[in-house]
Image (cartoon, rainbow, N blue to C red):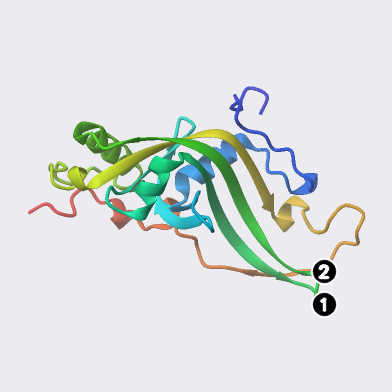
Amino acid sequence: MSDVKIPDYFDNRMRREDLAWNDWPAISKFLADQMVCRVAIHDQPFPYVLGQSYRFVDGRFLVHCSRFGKMADLIRRNPNVTIEVDHLVALLKAPKGQNTSFEYYSVLARCVVEWSEELEVVRAQQYEVLEKYRPEKDYTPIDDFAPAQITVFKCKVVQMSAKKRILADGQYSPPGQPQAPYLRYPFPPPAAVSSLPPEAFNPNRFSP
């Protein structure tokens, strides 16, 4: 870990220090693997929150939406957003009712958004995101119609924190409290690149 460059925006100070997830290589791998993030956008009187596909690269979340919808309109007004990515691993149960919890991983990022509707910028970012979802490059080129309907966003991270709770890592109870005798009930695999079968990335799928 001593040779790993931790980005300046990673600030993991939190009240429950025992839950802090400080393994930056593992966090980077997690963000590369997960399929969906949640984006919280300024709106009145309530925040506007929605799920988005994304790619995380070089300290930026790459996302997109219709240029005619609410998401694009709100971000044009206020480019400050918060992005959250999580993975629930298992349900935890112990005899006491208060000892009902989860194993999980969670990353929270505060971002400033740069957006574009220029055709070639949109197309270039779409190809960049396809490197995550279709690295086998089994597709035909992106035409002009779709990019003309899309706004792309580069959500630059200005502050990021990460937390996790995994029993195998000794994260049972808050410091000073007795260790709860948890029973562990794992969830099915998450929506992640690593959960997909090899045929999902078959480069010959559409070959004649």
How far across and how far down the image is residue 80, in percent?
Answer: 50, 40
Amino acid type, label 1: Pro
For disc 2, the marked residue is 181
Residue 20: x and y in percent read 72, 44
Where is 180 relative to 153, above or below?
below
- Other-residue count near label 2 (Cα within 10 Å), few / some / many at <14 / 14–19 / ≥20: some
SS class, disc 2: loop
- State the image quarter where residue 135 is shown: top left
Q: Is residue 121 left or right of residue 96?
A: left
Residue in view at x 13 percent, y 43 percent: 143
Task: Please name which of the two marks, 2 or 1, marks the residue nearer to the observer.
Answer: 1
**Res 145 visible:** yes
> Quick check: can you spot residue 135?
no
Q: Amino acid at mark 2?
A: Pro
Callouts 2 and 1 close, C-beta under 8 Å: yes
- Gap in Å between the C-alphas at discs 2 and 1? 8 Å
Q: Which one is in front, 99 or 44?
A: 44
Which quadrant would residue 121 be assigned to in this image? top left
Q: Position of residue 101 (x, y in %)?
A: 72, 66
Q: Which quarter of the figure has residue 153? A: top left
User: What's the residue at 58%, 40% (across, down)?
Assistant: 26
Residue at position x 53%, y 58% from top?
Answer: 45
Describe the element under mark 1 as helix, strand or loop: loop
Quarter containing the N terminus: top right
